[in-house]
Image (cartoon, helix red, strand yellow):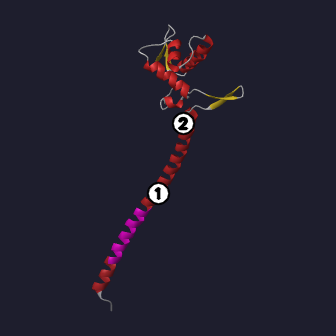
Amino acid sequence: MLDPELLERITTRRAELDELEEQLAKQLAEVRAERDELAVAERVLERVTGQLAEERSSTRPMPGQVGGRAVMLIPHREPGVEEDALPWDYQRIIAAVRQAAGPVMAREVGEVVGVDVSVKAKLEPLRSKLIKLVDRGWLRKLPDGRFTTRL
């Protein structure tokens, strides 16, 4: 005949193990669900990161072709697009306008950046660059024809 006290201990231990099994099964289901969520989050992050990289690369100046020669396109001024995205000569123009005491004429900018301002044909390409910077939002042109940095 079996010892009733021993049978009671076995029954109690079995109940404890059944309860522990339920807890562990529940915990395992939660872990699996979280792992699945992390896998989805990782895929979304990879996709969004790829999209952001594409958007950022499209806001950088991209070389284009004009008359068979490579030219650098001037990006529009937008949040996240810094002056270093501009070609060097455009950066120098903006710096010249910025260092002036107030609004400046194209001739004054030309003197700072080293353009021969006595020859109109050499001043016009500079004026064209200034206008392009105005059109793209980097500078502001006043009604009197002077240029200033945007505020």
Q: How many marks?
A: 2
Nearest the camera: 109 or 78?
Answer: 109
Q: Is residue 126 above or below residue 2?
A: above
Nearest the camera: 114 or 130?
Answer: 114
Mark positioned earlier in the residue sequence (2 or 1)? 1
Residue depth check, mark 2 versus mark 1: number of the one nearer the observer: 2
Q: Quick check: can you spot residue 146?
A: yes
> Label 1 neighbourhood size at 10 Å, few (<14), some (14-19), many (20+)?
few
Residue at 36%, 73% (x, y): give it.
Answer: 17
What's under tag 2, amino acid-wise? Arg
**Dividing the picture into quarters, in which one does residue 4 lie?**
bottom left
Which residue is the extreme one toward the top? 144
What's under tag 1, amino acid-wise? Arg
Q: What residue would you read off at disc 1?
A: 35
**Extent of the magenta region:** 13-28
Which residue is the extreme one toward the left? 5
**Dividing the picture into quarters, in which one does residue 64 lie?**
top right
Q: Is residue 116 above or below residue 26?
A: above
Percent of width and height locating residue 2: 32, 89
Give the SS element for disc 1: helix
Residue at 46%, 60% (x, y): give it.
Answer: 32
- Any magenta on residue 18? yes
